[in-house]
Amino acid sequence: MSENCELCILDRINHVFYNCDDFIIMSCDSCHVPMAVTHEHIDPTEKPLLTTEEKNKYLKIYKNMSNQLYIAAYDFFGDFNFYIDKKQRKIPNHVHWHARKLNEALCGNNLFSVQRNNWKILKQLGKAQ
Ligand SMILES: [Zn+2]
Ligand SMILES: [Zn+2]
């Protein structure tokens, strides 16, 4: 927990898609799309300092967080037209990922493969046919 970190404090929560001990998936206050945030102040820029035990713990959290974010995104967008954006621009030192709508102009030929990959993941999770 860091007192100056917006993502540790999370004082404006509108809609919650999912919540557990490790992370929350909520509607991002500025982007209005599903956003996953770890409850713990995990700083991805500090990677080299982690012990093996910590690394394994975080990998487990990330795997589960990714799965739940796919499910939230599928519910939210209603189709496979989205991608998981793990780039952290505004707050680089606390793990948070967005699920954003796919932009046809940006993706071009990649569009179909991203949609197909989304479908595969959601099928594995038992959410899509
Ligand atoms: Zn934080
Ligand atoms: Zn956002």
Image: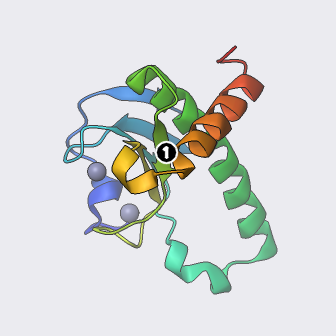
The quarter of the picture where the C terminus appears is top right
Q: Nearer the viewer, residue 1 or 71?
A: 71
Q: Residue at x 68, y 78 (%)?
A: 50
Q: Is residue 117 left or right of residue 15?
A: right
The residue lying furthest to the front in this view is 109
Q: Report the label total.
A: 1
Whether residue 38 is visible, yes or no, is: no
Q: Assess mark 1: CB under 8 A from ligand 2?
A: no
- The quadrant holding residue 125 is top right
The residue lying furthest to the top in this view is 129
In the picture of the structure, the residue carrying the numbered disc 1 is 83
Q: Nearer the viewer, residue 122 or 117?
A: 117
Whether residue 109 is visible, yes or no, is: yes
Q: Is residue 6 left or right of residue 24?
A: left
Q: Is residue 63 left or right of residue 103?
A: right
Q: Nearer the viewer, residue 57 or 69?
A: 69
Q: Is residue 63 left or right of residue 98?
A: right
Q: Secondary structure at mark 1?
A: strand
* Label 1 environment density (alpha carbons within 10 Å; few <14, some 14–19, many ≥20): some
The quarter of the picture where the N terminus appears is bottom left
Q: Residue at x 69, y 47 (%)?
A: 63
Which colour scheme appears in the figure? rainbow
Q: Residue at x 19, y 48 (%)?
A: 30
Q: Is 125 above or below relative to 95?
A: above
Which amino acid is tagged 1?
Answer: Tyr
Position in image of residue 92 (x %, y %): 38, 72
Q: Is 125 above or below relative to 104?
A: above
Q: Residue at x 65, y 29 (%)?
A: 119
Position in image of residue 86 (x %, y %): 48, 59
* Quarter of the rendered structure image containing ligand 1: bottom left
Position in image of residue 66 (x %, y %): 60, 44
